[in-house]
Image (tube, rainbow, N blue to C red):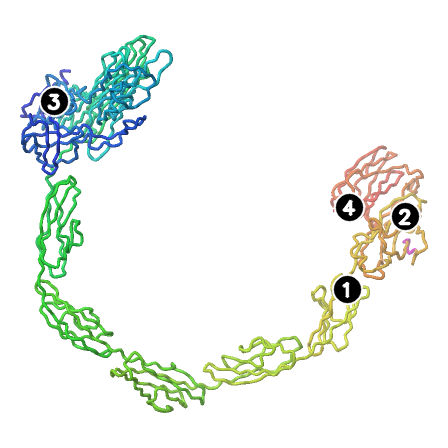
Amino acid sequence: MKILFSLIALVFSAIVVNAQPTVISGVVNSYTKVTSINYCTKTLGVTSTAGFSAGDKAIIIQMKGAEIDTANSSNFGSISGFNEAGNFEFVTIESITANNIRLKYLLGQNYNPNGAVQLVRLPKDITTAWVQGDPLTAPAWDGSTGGVLALEAQGAIDIRGSIDVSGKGFRGGDLNTGSIIQYNLPDYKSAITANRGGGKGESIIDVDSFSTASRGAPANGGGGGNQHNAGGGGGANGGNGGMGGREYYTSSPGLLNGGVGGHKLDFIGLNPKIFMGGGGGAGHQNDGVGTKGVAGGGIVILKTGVLVGRGNIIAANGNSQTINAQNDGAGGGGGGGTVFLHVDRITSPVRVEAYGGKGGNSNNSVTQGHGTGGGGGGGWITVSSGQLLDSIIPTLNGGNAGIILNTTNTFAAEAGQAGGTKIGWTIPESNLNPVIAQVAKDTVICPGGVASIGKRAIGGRQPYSYSWSPSLGLDNSSAEFPNASPLVSTPYTVTVTDSTGCKNQAQVYVRIHEKQIVSAGTDTAVCLGASVQLQANGRGIFQWTPLIGLNNSTIANPIATPTATTDYHLIVIDSNGCMSEDSMTVIVYPLPIVSISTIDTSICDGESIVISASGNSGATPYSYVWSPSTGVSDVRAQSPVFSPKATTSYSVTVIDANGCIANSSVTIHISPLPNVDAGASTNICYGDTTQLSGTGGISFSWSPSLGLSSTTIANPLAFPTQTMMYYLTSKNSNGCVSTDSVLVTVYPLPQIPVLTIASDTITSTVAYPVKQYMWSLDGVLIPFQNQKNLIAKQSGKYSLTVIDMNGCLSASLPIDVTLGSGTLALDDMCAYPGEIVHIPIRLLDALSVTETNATDIEMTLRFNSTILLPLGQDFLDNRVENGERIVRFRTPIVLGGNGLLRTMKFGVALGNDTATTIRITDYSSIGGRIYLSADTGVFCVLGICREGGARLYSSNGSSTSFIFNNPLPSEKTITLTMKTWETGITKLTIINILGQTISIPLNEFLIKGEHSIELDVSKLNIGTYLLILQTPNEYVARVLHIQK
């Protein structure tokens, strides 16, 4: 520790070499209340000037004057505006007279003497201050002065002892004196004389007499505890104060109506504000044993280059309530004050305290609690630089809540919140002088001239307002820089008022100079394009405007050649810079404008034309002269007749009454006549159209218009109903006209052909020579059909168009032709020899059969003659050729179910094979046209086997057999189940309808019994096949249909 002290002493001595320290302790400031302020004279009215001298430095500070919410609600005491409360600054005293102190400079901020403004004198001429002995302190705040310690040392402040303004701030709330008992009182404000609550702690606002008590917190002052016996709230500054304990109760907890803790004071603005800690609120009492609120911490203001802390204390703590309440409410702790350090650096640590005071305890019975006091909020530490905080040991905590000593219970009282720090704040100090009005220099202007007469004011507090008098001749009498244009010489006075209402005046004189009389000359007139010399007089610099038409605008006698009547304005500037003016007019007569009734024109060879010339825009009357005279009826006429033999250009000269001349010209072109051709004559059929081909011009007119698509084009469409002669009148590009004609011969149309239908043959009746026949089906031309009659190949509407020998066409009415279609088919069947079978013949997929009016169908059946024997008498043919039976018959077209046409009766013979195909051939319809196709049927003989190469017939039908399990018909695979009655080589063969072997899927030794085989039929073509199963002594066949 000794080594550290020596080091600190060494550093300090290096800073304050040759400085004699001033030892200070106790109270070093003088205080007086400020009762009035005159900003303009820099004068403060005070209650006393004792302790103050000219040249002293002091701090002016306003302690109160804020605005709060005064409603009887939880918002009571919330700060709505700080106003001037907390404003402070350094001032220097210039002089003292009676109870008036005049300052050296204007105040930099506003102050309201009604808000407890005090002036605090600083110790004078201290270079180095040693704080030792009794603590350096300030008198307690008494409602007008005190509570503030202010010290400035040019070199250093060395804290060898302590600085302490704890409890010097705003005072605590007073106790009520009555003994009214009432519970659960919710009010936030009341008069203390009403005994409804304890007194509120003092703060930056003075409340009215009806708001001095109850729990609402006035700004940073703590609220008083409500009856019955609630505790007071803690004061505040840098942190909120804590709420006081709940009211007294015997069985169940009472209302939380302890005093509200004071509100935190956190101001953000251009200039800093500082505040003392708020006083704590008093507890409510009715037995006379409650405790009042205690005072908050004061303010410490230090300004120096170096602060030597030595680990010692600067304290601005709020007081703690150390007296215990008995059967009444306890008071709240005081809020921490403010320590404002405007220093360059700190050379050794310093302990800075601004904590809140502890709330009062309650010492009563264990079972009957009374309200305890809320803790005070912490204060503020304000530094001019954030680096200073590295050398500061701060204590800013809020004060603890009071307790009930018998239980250590706070009884719902709250501790105060911690305070805070402000960085970058310095002590304001004004160097402003009173406002001084300024003006521009006196000036001389020409009549009608403008002078800027303003100049920015200096001193005072901005913003400034300006008022000029007289206002006559000024563009703005309240402007900082007005422009003056007086008619006579005038002195102008400006009054400047700064933001505090202080005024100052200045004057400027504006004098008017007399101008000379000049002449621009007399008015004159010229024709357009002519020139005239202007004649002006005067002395000085000449300026003619406009410049247009002048050869020189800066001489007295320029030559003017204007293009229109012009007012020339002359300005002559004399040696004083003043302008004299005059004007003259040069009247410009317009040249007459020649209007010719036509521009260059053309006439056809041999024609004449009248052309008129007219003058305008000039002075009447006009005279005219045409040239050359060739082909002109009268060269001095306004509208002569022109008959040139060749293309000629004519000019005309017009002279108006002013003698102004204008010329114009026109050319008359001679155009040849057009060579018109209406085209060659042509022939058309009645109702046809032909296109005419006119040539030889650029515009066309045909007549008559009958049968023409247009009469105004070269190539109109012509569709006359009788032979016509058309005439074409055509103009060329020059409008010359010629005529030609063309004959259109109209042939009559041939008679309409008549169509009749018999079966599928269409017959036409035409009574005149025909060049070409054209048949159509459903409106579509049938190619290669150039005959008179037609055999229909399909149903539809048929029509015939004929072209006669003149090339004219005639079309028949359409005739409906209906052709049927269908497929003849036989059912597959099997039977035993000797049986009689009826095989159905069907007409499948029949379409439009009835509509054809067909009555019968003839057909031929072909099959193995050894297997089937036809039975019947209606055959047209029944014979055998090369082992094949051929049966032809006719059957009526009467369809039954499933397209049944008729059945054929056959006897079944043993035959030379086990099956035969039945083919339908040579089929046709009778009475109407039906387009037919035919399928092939299969018939098989049952019960046939072989023994020793001989075909055997099994009368009971029990022999080797096989069946198809699935699927039938098939397109991929089928399952075949076989039942054999003997053991040996078993062979399965697939044969097509032509008897050709397709494949042998089985040829192996099998044991007697039932067997299954999977057949792949995916590679077989669509159609009918015969499957033959052969064992050593048996031969069985089945029909297989393949569909895909």
User: Magenta stretch containing residue 881, yes or no?
Assistant: yes
Q: Which residue is mark 1?
A: 792
- Of badges 3 and 1, nearer the viewer stands 3
Label 3, residues with CA under 10 Å away: few <14, some 14-19, many ≥20:
many
Q: Is residue 894 left or right of residue 693?
A: right
Which element carries disc 3, helix, strand or loop? strand
Q: Work out whether mark 2 precedes mark 4 in sequence or the reverse, and give the earlier one.
A: 2
Q: Which residue is mark 4?
A: 1042
User: Magenta stretch containing residue 748, yes or no?
Assistant: no
787 or 391, nearer to the observer:
391
Residue 528 x, y percent position in the rendering: 24, 78
Q: Which residue is mark 2?
A: 838
Q: Which residue is mark 3?
A: 158
904 or 266, nearer to the observer:
266
Residue 736 makes an appearance in the image = yes
Q: Work out whether mark 3 precedes mark 1 in sequence or the reverse, and give the earlier one.
A: 3
Rounded to the nearest whole Å, what is the CA distance between mark 4 and mark 1?
A: 36 Å
Which element carries disc 4, helix, strand or loop? strand
Label 1, residues with CA under 10 Å away: few <14, some 14-19, many ≥20:
some
Rounded to the nearest whole Å, what is the CA distance between mark 2 and mark 1?
A: 37 Å
Residue 292 x, y percent position in the rendering: 23, 16
Q: Pointers 4 and 3 in contact (CB under 8 A)? A: no
Q: Amino acid at mark 3?
A: Asp
Give the magenta part as a residue range.
880-884
Q: Work out whether mark 2 precedes mark 1 in sequence or the reverse, and give the earlier one.
A: 1
